[in-house]
Image: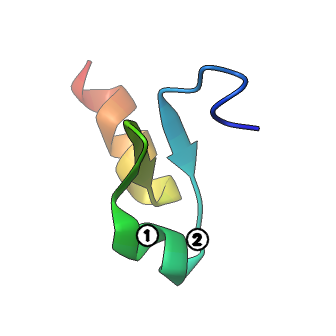
Amino acid sequence: MAIEGDAAIIVSGDKHLLNLKEYQGITILTPRQFLDSLDAE
């Protein structure tokens, strides 16, 4: 779904996904990393 939806980021707590760090150009972040990235903007 992320690919079809042209997502830029996947937010997940799943350790298997997080270990990938990126999938087909889509960044995979923890909820904390995502919130921190919003604060940095």
Query: Tag 2: residue type?
Result: Gly
Above or below, comparing residue 1 to residue 20 in the picture: above
Report helix, strand or loop for mark 2: loop
Q: Are marks 2 and 1 in contact (CB under 8 Å)?
A: yes
For label 1, the crowd category at 10 Å Cα-Cα, with few meaning under 14, some 14 to 19 and many 20 or more, is: some
Query: Looking at the rendering, which quadrant does residue 36 occupy?
Result: top left
Residue 20, quarter of picture: bottom left
Q: Position of residue 23 (x, y in %)?
A: 43, 50
| Crowding near the residue tagged with mark 2, few <14, some 14–19, many ≥20 C-alpha atoms within 10 Å | few
Q: Which residue is mark 2?
A: 13
The residue tagged with tag 1: helix, strand or loop?
helix
Of 35 and 12, nearer the camera is 12
On residue 35, which mark appears? none
Report the Cα–Cα distance between label 2 and label 1: 7 Å
Pointer 1: what residue?
18
Between 1 and 41, the one lying in front of the other is 1
**Whole-percent x and y of residue 1?**
76, 38
Q: Position of residue 34 (x, y in %)?
A: 43, 44
* Left or right: 9 in relation to 21: right
> In this view, which residue lies farthest toward the right?
1
Front residue of 33/8: it is: 8
Task: Work out which quarter of the rendered image holds the C terminus and state it.
Answer: top left
Q: Residue at x 49, y 36 (%)?
A: 9
Q: As shown in the figure, which amino acid type bears the numbered disc 1?
A: Leu
Q: Is residue 16 left or right of residue 18?
A: right
